[in-house]
Image (cartoon, grey):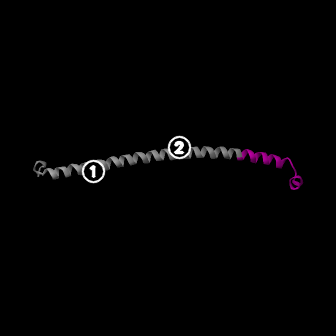
Amino acid sequence: RGLSQLSLATLYKAFKAKLASRETARQRLLTTAWELEEMERQGSFLQALHADNKQLLGLEDAKLERMRAWFSSRNLTEVEDD
């Protein structure tokens, strides 16, 4: 059967079904775009977190070095007396 033999009501339902299919595809595309955006932002956040942690670790390393130097410049009795 050709489209010309369908009633106007049936043609309208076909149009609405096609419209719904198109909207489904559009929404899937939009969801995928937001998922990509989320991944990029998560990656950016993790890089910033890594940089912060690296900086904090560097500060802790410096403190540890100062403590090591302090302890190595004293003998065991001086350390126990403090």
Q: Is residue 68 magenta?
A: yes
Foreground: disc 1 or disc 2 = 1
Residue span colored magenta? 60-82
**Residue 38 in the figure: left or right of residue 59:** left
Circles 1 and 2, Cβ within 8 Å, touching? The answer is no
Element under disc 1: helix
22 and 8: which is toward the camera: 8
**Quadrant of the rendered image containing residue 76:** bottom right
**Residue at horizontal 48%, vertical 44%?**
40
Q: Position of residue 28 (x, y in %)?
A: 35, 49
Q: Is residue 49 magenta?
A: no
The residues bearing labels 1 and 2 have C-alpha atoms spaced at a distance of 36 Å
61 and 44: which is toward the camera: 44
66 and 19: which is toward the camera: 19
Disc 1 crowd, CA 10 A, few/some/many (<14, 14-19, 20+): few
Q: Amino acid at mark 1?
A: Ala
Q: Position of residue 10 (x, y in %)?
A: 16, 53
Q: Which residue is mark 1?
A: 20
Q: Main secondary structure of the magenta part?
A: helix
**Residue 47 in the figure: left or right of residue 19:** right
35 and 10: which is toward the camera: 10
- In the picture, the disc for residue 44 is 2
**Residue at horizontal 19%, vertical 50%?**
12
Q: Amino acid at mark 2?
A: Ser
**Residue at horizontal 43%, vertical 48%?**
35
Element under disc 2: helix
